Image (cartoon, grey):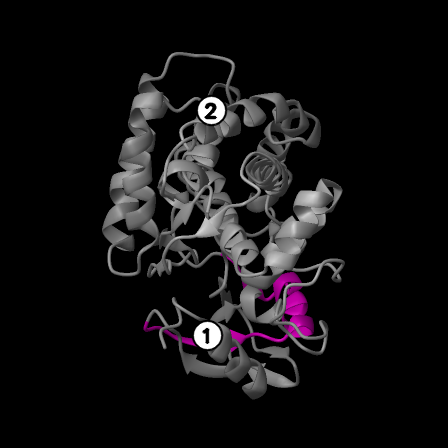
């Protein structure tokens, strides 16, 4: 079975081997870090560098450059500002679900899980509404192993043009206009700002439809939804394969020495299913220990608060309006560095 369809057997094998040199599902030779404690250690290790590609993108820089780049972005994505977006996110969610009324079948990804977060991030950043289809196509190509290199060049060209031609406004691009590396930062914020949340919503809805008891508990007691969002992120989060690093010196992780200059992959998905940390890790269960779905250390996701808010509103609104939602067909998983569904059809009412 393909990693992209079901990564669980791969996670089990990687953790059994411990840190080891393997061929990753995208065809690279890399040292795989997969056990929870090893992953936490690796994500904090000063000799495992995030600078794995040129361009100065925030998630591919190390201190002190990373510290300088992250500060204004963290300010733009402050908790206070994200919380203030709740009414607008609720409005968008309800508008999208209005279209489900009377429909026999709908595609969750196309009609809800994708348009909700991309509308939010584009409005927040200041990306024109008419560019959303372009942004989605560029993002999909950037995250697909076969097209990543070419897509990055076209995405940066789009972002550069946007930065130079956009009129100032009440948005993040305007706020960050004078910051260095804005073009590469914009590519990251657009991509991570909608793609990961889209797949959180899609895989979370699928998990609920396969676990009717959990779905019923959230319908009956919506106060549990924030806990459910955390469990969806742990159980089947977007970063199944993981994050890339390169060893700048010999590094010891889990009792194994990783040689200098080695490529390293830190699997958040495998860590989040580690039975040494979670009992019955392949089972959805609320109230788990904290997870590493958003990473760990200095590269912890700057948009984590926004993603959580969008997830809470998406699941809360969906279950309130369509509590009898059922699966219409088996979903299709896609091949992407961000784990997620390509198509997912449901019936709003049985």
Which is nearer the eye, 312 or 207? 207
**Residue 297 shows which numbered tag?**
none
The part of the chain drawn in magenta is 27-50
Residue 37 is covered by the magenta coloring: yes
Circles 2, 1 touching at the beta carbon (< 8 Å): no
- Which residue: 52% across, 81% down? 14
Q: Which residue is mark 2?
A: 95
Q: Name the residue carrying label 1.
A: 262
Q: Is residue 58 left or right of residue 183?
A: right
Classify mark 1: residues with Cα within 10 Å, few (<14), some (14-19) or many (20+): some
**Is residue 48 in view from this perspective?**
yes
Can residue 295 be spotted in the picture?
no
How far is mark 2 from mark 1, CA to CA? Answer: 49 Å
Give coordinates of residue 44: x percent, y percent. 66, 62
- Quarter-of-image position of residue 113: top left
Q: Is residue 253 above or below residue 110?
A: below
- Looking at the rendering, which quadrant does residue 256 occupy? bottom right
Give the SS element for disc 1. Answer: loop
User: In this rendering, would 166 be left or right of 310?
Assistant: left
Above-or-below relation of 164 to 323: above
Give the residue displayed 41% in from the left and 34% down from the top: 115
**Residue at 47% across, 78% down:** 10
Q: Along the line of sight, which residue is nearer the eye, 184 or 111?
A: 111
Return the residue nearer the eye: 46 or 75.
Answer: 75
Q: Earlier in the sequence, mark 2 or mark 1?
A: 2
In the displayed structure, 34 sits above or below 149; it is: below
Magenta run includes residue 268: no
Task: Estimate the x, y position of residue 217 in percent, counting from the top left.
Answer: 70, 51
Q: Tell me the SS state at disc 2.
A: helix
**How would you rate the neighbour count of disc 2 (Cα within 10 Å): few for under 14, some for 14-19, many for 20 or more?**
few
In the picture, the quarter occupied by the N terminus is bottom left
Give coordinates of residue 212: x percent, y percent: 59, 57
């Amino acid at each position: 079975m393909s990693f992209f369809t079901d990564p669980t057997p791969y996670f089990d094998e990687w953790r059994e081997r411990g840190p080891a040199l393997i061929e990753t599902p995208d065809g690279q030779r890399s040292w795989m870090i997969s056990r929870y404690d090893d992953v936490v250690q690796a994500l904090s290790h000063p000799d495992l560098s995030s600078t794995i590609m040129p361009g100065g993108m925030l998630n591919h820089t190390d201190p002190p450059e990373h510290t300088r780049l992250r500060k204004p972005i963290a300010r733009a994505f402050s908790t206070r500002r994200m919380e203030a977006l709740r009414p607008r996110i609720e409005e968008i969610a309800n508008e999208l679900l209005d279209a489900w009324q009377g429909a026999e079948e709908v595609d969750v990804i196309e009609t809800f899980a994708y348009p909700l977060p991309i509308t939010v991030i584009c409005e927040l950043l200041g990306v024109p509404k008419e560019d959303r289809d372009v942004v989605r196509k560029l993002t999909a190509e950037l995250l697909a192993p076969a097209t990543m290199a070419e897509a990055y060049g076209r995405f940066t060209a789009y972002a550069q043009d946007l930065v130079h031609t956009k009129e100032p406004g009440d948005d993040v691009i305007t706020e960050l206009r004078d910051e260095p590396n804005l073009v590469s930062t914009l590519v990251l914020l657009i991509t991570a700002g909608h793609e990961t949340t889209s797949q959180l919503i899609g895989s979370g809805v699928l998990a609920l439809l396969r676990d009717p008891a959990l779905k019923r508990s959230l319908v009956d007691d919506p106060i549990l939804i924030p806990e459910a969002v955390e469990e969806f992120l742990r159980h089947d989060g977007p970063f199944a394969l993981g994050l890339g690093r390169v060893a700048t010196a010999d590094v010891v992780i889990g009792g194994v020495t990783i040689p200098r200059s080695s490529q390293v992959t830190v699997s958040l998905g495998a860590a989040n299913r580690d039975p040494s940390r979670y009992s019955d890790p392949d089972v959805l269960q609320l109230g788990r220990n904290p997870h590493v779905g958003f990473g760990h250390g200095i590269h912890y996701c700057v948009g984590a608060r926004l993603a959580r808010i969008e997830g809470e509103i998406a699941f809360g609104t969906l279950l309130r309006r369509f509590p009898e939602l059922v699966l219409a067909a088996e979903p299709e998983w896609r091949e992407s560095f961000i784990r997620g569904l390509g198509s997912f059809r449901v019936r709003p009412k049985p």
